[in-house]
């Protein structure tokens, strides 16, 4: 099975890493926003004018 | 971008220093790891004990000389201890590196060669002297003033009486932190943070800020400074120097009512834990009205851009 | 199919039996509640109240307002007595009464939390033994659970003895205060006593019935009994907590301290639930630490490889359980702190910024020691596994992250410095240290530390394994993304906190904690799934671990004990000169706050005393053992929690 891991090209690995980074960013941003919202607070306080 | 440029030239940039220090530490750590890796690749194996010693000495030098203003010894001692613990955890993390680390120590203890024998002799002779020196140092009469554990923000009373009126610190609020309709507002400061208090048609909040500013510059700025940073012209006559409102650890951490109590009662009104004379601020209730005190506090928050602490 | 049904049937019966047991055992509690609420007898504490306070309840049905809930209620109790210094209210030996009470209280608490925690482990381990398919493993688990309960049995009687000593100390040295407390908590105290009987009964049946209830349905009943045991234990603790919570944040009485007839208000004060949660988690972490130290001690004194393997394994399991509860502990503590601030700002500032702030710095050091030790132990654990060398090269980076975070975490808000240093620095505030000193930075640091601990654990889980699932590269990439962004998010939130007002900033801690918990739950779960059926590069050789790791376990346990003593002292002394906060004043000569040095010495004394007596308990436990563990040959497959087998 280890060979199978080896079969995956470097490009695909980087692609997956980038995709998961984007996914994680989206998830954490949503988490920050939602949990602040539940407390009745504004996560984007600084960026709103 | 300018900030990054300054950082890269090795300048400590005010306001960014905390992150800058962490960043520098990280870079140096990577540099260390990289350097020893490179040396190892080229056949020069640096012993773990030597690496550890180098790292420790470097960290001491960094915390002592790099950060300005200088860090007090008590904090540097904490940092050095933490570094030492970290180094120990690192060298003993694997059996192999632990053996490497102990090797020179054991070699000296065994003293199988002429050199190690000499080192052992020197160490054995020097050790009692070191202990003796430590003993001497701790017994030596000291003329320094004693260290005091000053409580900068002692716990306030539940309520305070100013000009015959009782304010409950938990529930009282500034009568001037109000929106245009005259109702208390948490958000009004943010709305007008870039507003112009000198505008004739400014909303009531900004007008109060202006009045507070006038009071500040007539009474407070001699000590607390015209930039509210605790560097007024009289500041260095006092020890400790006056509070720096632009620091995130002062008014930014406190409820508005706490500040009201401190300003009204001054240094002499501090509870016992704040004594003796850890503040020479006069009790301003003797010179200002209740309204003036609230206004000057309003100004301080507006000017520094910090918000008073609230609990809901 | 038929066997499955039988299994399910067994479970249903077990749950039924469990429900009945719980119902019967908790009946006294429910029965006592309405009795207490309607107020059985008038003013039982009247005799202890000084005459000056008597006329207050002269009117027939007087109404008064609850000091916390603000509800109206009929005045039933007597007002809180106003004590004076003297032999009537504060009889004493030629010694500081408070210190005697301190020792009695602390020792009772140590043993109490130990005997509350260990049955919970027992329950978990026994359950694991039942569901494990492998017969040898099941026996090993069962034996471990039995060993646990055996230790806790001796400790249990010691707890009761210490509880008795504590009550007598109260009665003899603080009679007026205890009388007042008893007058308010009368029904609760009786329920407590009855529940204690139930707890003892269940514990003895549980222990002595172990062999009789070994097979089939009876085994399920047996494991159900451990659940009941723990339910009773938890309720017991919560009742006891209501007393201390009342002393700190009283409710259900009016401003004079007169009981208003609603016992639920008296129990359910604002700090009760935060203290409950904090104590349950704390007990578990503490219990894990103590058992781990026991295992480490046996490991270090072991003569054979089998013994070493067994105790290495036992230490690992105990440490694992302890750390599982250590991780949420700071969050529970944060919640408690927030509630304290919300209750009285003054109390919060006394704790965090005022009189007791220095103790909090010591506490920060201890928390640091706990997490560092845990990480260190996990790294050392990599030595057990062949193939784990791959991960050892990452240790240095993790050390760096941890130490840097601790440097931030330990930077005090108010620094100790000589006047000369103060002048050189140009004031109390430092442009670097000042920023590290506030909550925003601390939250960022501790969350980074916990996330790194989770990462260490994931690394340990993977140690000698290579995932074989098809989506392994995707899973690895996802773990990478998750942890990278978690670090970024935590640090970002910490920095962001400096730019926004305090009330918004305080809210940031919630997403920050959620980030850490996301890593914990998503990361560990995903990793465990990936490791299902993974290829092993080499066996896990229990017992093949450095002695340093075992000293780390002992250090972990000592740090737990010391910290418990410290935090208990802080929580208790924040009332300052009040017996019951703002209701009953402490007028004894010992109403002052001790110096930090004296308090630290007292805590150390308590810790030493506890460890000496618990060693005795362990020794007693070892007397009954004929031959130590069920033979576990080196390299034999042994169970490991969290699905890494």
Image (cartoon, coloured by chain):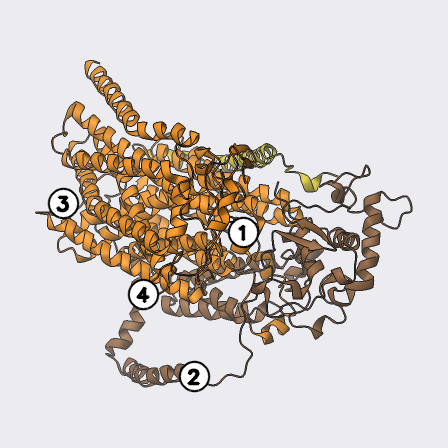
How much space separates mark 4 and mark 2, taking CA atoms?
39 Å
Residue of label 2: B139
Q: Residues within 10 Å of mark 3 (few under 14, many from 20)?
A: some
Of labels 1 and 3, earlier in sequence is 1
Q: Is residue C632 above or below residue B69?
A: above
Badge nearest the viewer, 1 or 3? 1
Chain ID, mark 4: B
Res B305 seen here = yes
The tag on residue C48 is: none
Q: Quadrant of residue B22?
A: bottom right
Where does residue C253 sit, x and y in percent of width and height? 50, 40
Where does residue B307 sit, x and y in percent of width and height? 69, 48
Of labels 4 and 2, earlier in sequence is 4
Residue of label 3: C629
Where does residue C67 sit, x and y in percent of width and height? 54, 40
The tag on residue B100 is: 4
Verify CB contact (< 8 Å) between mark 1 and mark 2: no
């Amino acid at each position: 099975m280890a060979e199978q891991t080896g079969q995956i090209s470097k490009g695909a690995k980087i692609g997956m890493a980038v995709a998961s980074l984007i996914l994680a960013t989206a998830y954490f941003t949503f988490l920050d926003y939602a949990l602040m919202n539940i407390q009745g607070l504004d996560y984007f306080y600084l960026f709103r004018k | 971008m300018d900030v990054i440029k300054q950082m890269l030239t090795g300048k400590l940039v005010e306001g960014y220093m905390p992150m800058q220090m962490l960043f520098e530490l990280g870079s140096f750590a990577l540099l260390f790891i990289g350097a020893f890796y490179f040396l190892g690749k080229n056949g020069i194996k640096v012993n773990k004990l030597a690496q550890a010693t180098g790292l420790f000495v470097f960290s001491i030098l960094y915390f002592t000389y790099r950060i300005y203003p200088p860090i007090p010894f008590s904090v540097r001692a904490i940092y050095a201890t933490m570094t030492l613990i970290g180094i120990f955890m690192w060298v003993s993390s694997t059996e192999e590196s632990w053996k490497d680390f102990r090797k020179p120590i054991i070699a000296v203890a065994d003293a199988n060669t002429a050199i190690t024998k000499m080192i052992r002799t020197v160490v054995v002779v020097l050790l009692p002297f070191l202990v003796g020196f430590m003993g001497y140092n701790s017994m030596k009469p000291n003329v320094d003033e004693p260290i005091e554990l000053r409580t900068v923000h002692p716990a306030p009373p539940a309520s305070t009486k100013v000009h015959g009126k009782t304010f409950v610190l938990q529930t009282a609020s500034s009568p001037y932190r109000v929106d245009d309709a005259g109702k208390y507002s948490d958000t009004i400061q943010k709305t007008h943070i870039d507003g112009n208090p000198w505008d004739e048609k400014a909303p009531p909040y900004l007008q109060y800020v202006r009045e507070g500013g006038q009071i500040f510059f007539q009474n407070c700025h001699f000590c607390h400074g015209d930039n509210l940073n605790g560097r007024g012209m009289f500041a260095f006559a006092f020890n400790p120097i006056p509070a720096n409102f632009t620091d995130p650890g002062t008014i930014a951490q406190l409820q508005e009512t706490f500040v009201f109590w401190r300003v009204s009662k001054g240094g002499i009104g501090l509870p016992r834990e704040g004594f003796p004379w850890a503040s020479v601020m006069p009790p301003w209730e003797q010179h200002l009205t209740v309204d003036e005190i609230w206004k000057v506090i309003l100004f301080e928050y507006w000017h520094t851009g910090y918000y008073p602490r609230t609990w809901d | 199919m038929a066997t499955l049904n039988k299994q399910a049937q067994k479970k249903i019966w077990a749950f039924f039996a469990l429900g009945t047991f719980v119902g019967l055992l908790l009946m006294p509690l429910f029965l006592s509640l309405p009795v207490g609420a309607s107020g059985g007898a008038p003013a039982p504490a009247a005799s202890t109240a000084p005459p000056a306070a008597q006329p207050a309840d002269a009117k027939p049905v007087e109404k008064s307002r609850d000091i916390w809930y603000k509800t109206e209620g009929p005045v039933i109790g007597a007002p809180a007595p106003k004590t004076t210094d003297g032999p009537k209210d504060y009889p004493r030996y030629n010694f500081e009464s408070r210190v005697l009470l301190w020792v009695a209280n602390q020792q009772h608490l140590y043993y109490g939390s130990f005997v509350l925690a260990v049955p919970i482990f027992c329950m978990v381990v026994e359950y694991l033994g039942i569901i494990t398919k492998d017969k040898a493993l099941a026996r090993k688990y069962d034996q471990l659970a039995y060993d646990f309960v055996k230790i806790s049995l001796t400790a249990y009687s010691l707890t009761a003895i210490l509880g008795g000593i504590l009550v007598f100390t109260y009665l003899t040295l603080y009679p007026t205060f205890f009388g007042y407390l008893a007058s308010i908590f009368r029904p609760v105290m009786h329920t407590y006593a009855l529940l204690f009987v139930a707890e003892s009964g269940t514990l003895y049946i549980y222990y002595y019935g172990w062999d009789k209830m070994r097979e089939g349905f009876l085994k399920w009943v047996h494991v159900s009994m451990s659940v009941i045991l723990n339910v009773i234990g938890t309720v017991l603790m919560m009742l006891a907590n209501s007393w201390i919570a009342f002393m700190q944040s009283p409710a259900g009485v009016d401003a004079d301290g007169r009981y208003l007839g609603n016992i639920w208000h008296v129990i359910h004060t604002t700090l009760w639930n935060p203290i409950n949660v904090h104590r349950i988690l704390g007990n578990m972490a503490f219990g894990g630490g103590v058992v781990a130290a026991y295992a480490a001690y046996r490991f270090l004194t072991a003569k054979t490889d089998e013994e070493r393997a067994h105790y290495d394994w036992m230490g690992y399991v105990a440490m694992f359980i302890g750390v599982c509860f250590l991780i949420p502990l700071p969050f529970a503590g944060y919640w408690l702190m927030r509630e304290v601030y919300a209750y009285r700002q003054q109390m919060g500032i006394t704790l965090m910024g005022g009189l007791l702030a220095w103790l909090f710095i010591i506490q920060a050091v201890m928390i640091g020691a706990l997490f560092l030790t845990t990480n260190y132990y996990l790294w050392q654990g990599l030595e057990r596994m062949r193939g784990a060398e791959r991960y050892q090269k990452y240790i240095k980076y993790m050390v760096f992250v941890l130490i840097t975070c601790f440097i931030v975490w330990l930077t005090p808000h108010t620094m100790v410095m000589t006047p000369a240093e103060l002048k050189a620095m140009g004031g109390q505030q430092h442009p670097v240290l000042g920023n590290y000193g506030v909550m925003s930075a601390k939250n960022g640091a501790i969350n980074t530390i916990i996330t790194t601990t989770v990462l260490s654990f994931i690394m340990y889980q993977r140690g000698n394994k290579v995932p074989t699932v098809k989506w392994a590269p995707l899973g690895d990439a996802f773990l990478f993304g998750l942890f990278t962004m978690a670090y970024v998010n935590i640090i970002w939130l910490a920095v962001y906190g400096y730019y926004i007002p305090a009330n918004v900033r305080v809210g940031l801690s919630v997403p920050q904690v959620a980030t850490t918990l996301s890593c914990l739950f998503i990361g560990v779960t995903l990793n465990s799934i990936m490791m299902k059926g993974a290829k092993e590069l080499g066996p896990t050789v229990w017992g093949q671990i450095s002695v340093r790791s075992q000293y780390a376990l002992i250090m972990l346990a000592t740090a737990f004990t010391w910290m418990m003593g410290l935090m208990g002292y802080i929580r208790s002394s924040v009332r300052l000169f009040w017996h019951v906060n703002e209701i009953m004043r402490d007028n004894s000569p010992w109403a002052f706050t001790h110096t930090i040095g004296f308090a630290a010495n007292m805590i150390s004394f308590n810790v030493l005393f506890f460890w000496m007596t618990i060693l005795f308990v362990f020794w007693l436990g070892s007397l009954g053992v004929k031959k130590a563990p069920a033979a576990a040959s080196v390299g034999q497959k042994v169970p490991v929690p969290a699905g890494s087998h």
